[in-house]
Image (cartoon, helix red, strand yellow):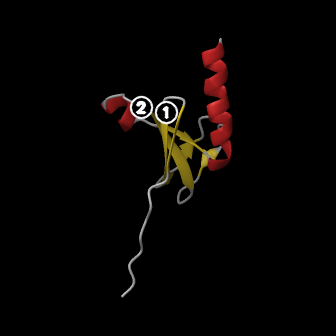
Amino acid sequence: MTTEVKLAVVIKGEGKIARLTKSRKYHRCGVCQDYIYKGLYYWAITTAGRVLGGIKFPEKVHPRCLNDYFEKIKRSREL
């Protein structure tokens, strides 16, 4: 009998929490606006310390766009 262990991948930074999630339907990336296709992995990003609204509607980002997302947040805080 084999058991598959799934580890939760979580990144915290800039007041945000990013969790790696597998897509069950089509989404749009919050950075590049390309589709995140069904069955692919994406980062679900929520704001740390928010209540239900932040958890229920996370921002969705491709794995390749995660660094661009955090750079965009850093630039917006510098203004």
Q: Is residue 20 left or right of residue 50?
A: right
Q: Residue 5 versus residue 34: which sits nearer the camera?
A: 5
Instruction: Say if residue 78 shows up in the picture.
Output: yes
The answer to whether mark 2 and mark 1 are in CB contact below 8 A is yes
Q: What is the x, y in percent for residue 35?
A: 62, 46
Residue 48 marker: 2
- Furthest-front residue in this view: 13
Mark closer to the chain start, 2 or 1: 1
The image position of residue 72, as x and y in percent, is: 65, 27
Please report the residue visible at 65 percent of the width from the left and 15 percent of the height from the top. Answer: 78
Whether 74 is drawn above or below 43: the answer is above
Of 27 and 15, which appears nearest the observer? 15
Which residue is at a point 57% across and 57% down the rendered structure image?
40
Q: Position of residue 22 (x, y in %)?
A: 49, 56
Pick the front one: 61 or 72: 72
Q: Which residue is mark 1?
A: 16
Secondary structure state at the residue bearing disc 2:
loop
Q: Amino acid at mark 1?
A: Lys
Please indicate whether residue 49 sits to the left or right of residue 11 in the image: left
Q: Secondary structure at mark 1?
A: strand
